[in-house]
Amino acid sequence: MQYPSCPRPSNVKFGSLRSRSLAGVITALLVGCATPTQRPGFSWHPSPNFDARKANLVVIHHTSDDTAAQALRTLTTPERKVSAHYLIGRDGSVMQLVDESARAWHAGLSWWNGQTDVNSASIGIELDNTGSEPFPAAQIDALLALLADIKQRHGIPTANFIGHADVAPGRKDDPSIFFPWPQLAEQGFGLWCAPPYASAPENFDLPLALTALGYDPRKPEASRQAFRLHFLRENGSGEKGDAPSSAENDLLYCLLGRKAQAAGD
């Protein structure tokens, strides 16, 4: 019996550095070359009509480590059971750890637009950053180049470039308030609205609108906090259960308009 040929890990080159961990290569080969599992009692009739699963989201993280070397150890140590497809150093160096066709372990328990297994639908990018410092220009430049390449190859929608906190509200807070979401949005990676905003309708429902944007409806307060972290670049969402401000409603109304516009482009 013949099985599909093994996919080669993608060649990635950014600036002067091209690197990938041995663990990532082995994982990609194992995923691509494994013998199909035949269920007991069923006969195997392989069809040629398939292709590799393709990501439709990009999730951005900060490592919380002091150095890229520390982060690399964490992301490649089997006992830690955490990984990402890419790690970008403060100097702009790009390391690929997992092939894009494989499922990296970066999002954990998560939700976005009804997707409860974000790892299976996303590419994870870790940025070497403690979470309490600005992101260097060289690092952001490398990220923008990587995102442009990923978006072109996978056709990822503009609205689907998001942060770890967005998909894991209340559990994660990365990337931090220092992350330059407006700069990414200018290049077509994620949504952004700058004031002044048009007024939201009088009966505007913020929790419902957060769900329409992609946030987890099961965690309304945590989702609101994650929304404020990303789009207002603020930590916290005020007192628990307090009424949304008109600015929050107006901003979210604008973002939903941008999402609809981007989907139609």
Image (tube, helix red, strand yellow):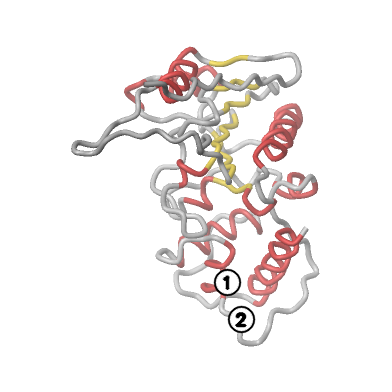
Q: Relative to 168, does residue 82 appear above or below in the rendering?
A: above
Rendering coords of residue 34 (x, y %): 37, 22
At x 68% / y 44%, what residue is drawn? Answer: 155
Location of the N terminus by quadrant is top left
Report the side of 15 relative to 84 (left or right).
Answer: right
Residue sitting nearer the eye, 115 or 91: 115
Q: Relative to 11, does residue 141 appear above or below in the rendering?
A: below
At x 76% / y 19%, what residue is drawn? Answer: 15
Residue sitting nearer the eye, 263 or 143: 263
Give how far apart the Cα atoms at labels 1 and 2 are. Answer: 8 Å
Which element carries disc 1, helix, strand or loop? helix
Classed neighbour count for the residue bearing mark 2: other residues with Cα under 10 Å, few (<14), some (14–19), many (≥20): some
Q: Which mark is residue 209?
A: 1
Residue sitting nearer the eye, 104 or 29: 29
User: Mark 1 is on which residue type?
Assistant: Ala
User: Mark 2 is on which residue type?
Assistant: Phe
Residue sitting nearer the eye, 72 or 112: 112
Q: Which mark is residue 204?
A: 2
First in sequence: mark 1 or mark 2? 2
Q: Do the residues bearing badges 1 and 2 touch, measured as CB atoms within 8 Å?
A: yes
Rendering coords of residue 41 (x, y %): 19, 38
At x 39% / y 20%, what residue is drawn? Answer: 77
Place residue 38 in its image quadrant. top left
